Amino acid sequence: MPSRVGKQVKLASIDELLGVPSTEGTVDLDVMTIYPFENHPFRVVDDEKMDELVESIKESGVLTPVLVRPDDEGTYEMISGHRRLHAAKRAGLRKIPAIIKEMTNDDAIIAMVNANMQREEILPSEKAFAFKMKMDAIKH
């Protein structure tokens, strides 16, 4: 029988079990220092779902950090979180939790597309354009 002496088992936290995203490495960024991803294929619309997100942010804050990459100007390009940023601005927030990550253009495109594909309200034309962007990035 194999010995289990000296082996440590890491138990998952409640947050990990529930799929709560990690906020490790998160900083609060001024919302005015973040600009949209170039050629972002997904619309950000002021509809009922946006109104619900704004109300949620007013009540609880932004629960999931946005993902940005730094540029040479001291500002940040949004990779994932365009809707959260828009809702945070509408809710009157001046800062938003963000994860800053250095990424190549191709890595940023792939991350942006992957982060948005689970959304239900994506138009087929948006999905097609996003998949084309991702395929081009992968080919590089």
Image (tube, rainbow, N blue to C red):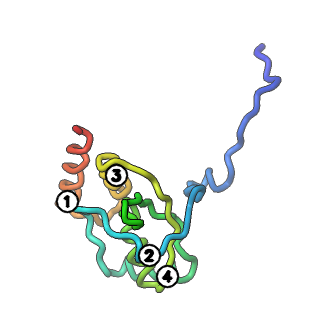
Dividing the picture into quadrants, the one containing residue 73 is: bottom left
Measured as percent of width and height from the top left, residue 30 is found at: 47, 75
Depth check, mark 1 against mark 2: the one in front is 2
User: Residue lying furthest front in this view?
Assistant: 73
Measured as percent of width and height from the top left, residue 139 is found at: 22, 38
Say which residue label 1 marks: 124
Query: Tag 1's secondary structure?
Result: helix
Tell me which label, 4 or 2, sits earlier in the chain: 2
The Cα–Cα distance between marks 1 and 2, rounded to whole angstroms, is 30 Å
Figure check: 36 above or below 55: above
Mark 4 vs 2: CB contact within 8 A: yes
Say which residue label 3 marks: 108
What residue is rendered at 38% in x and 49% in y? 103
Say which residue label 4 marks: 93
Mark 3 vs 1: CB contact within 8 A: no
Q: Residue 31 carries which label?
A: 2
Figure check: 110 above or below 96: above
The Cα–Cα distance between marks 2 and 3, rounded to whole angstroms, is 20 Å
Amino acid, disc 4: Leu
Tell me which label, 2 or 3, sits earlier in the chain: 2
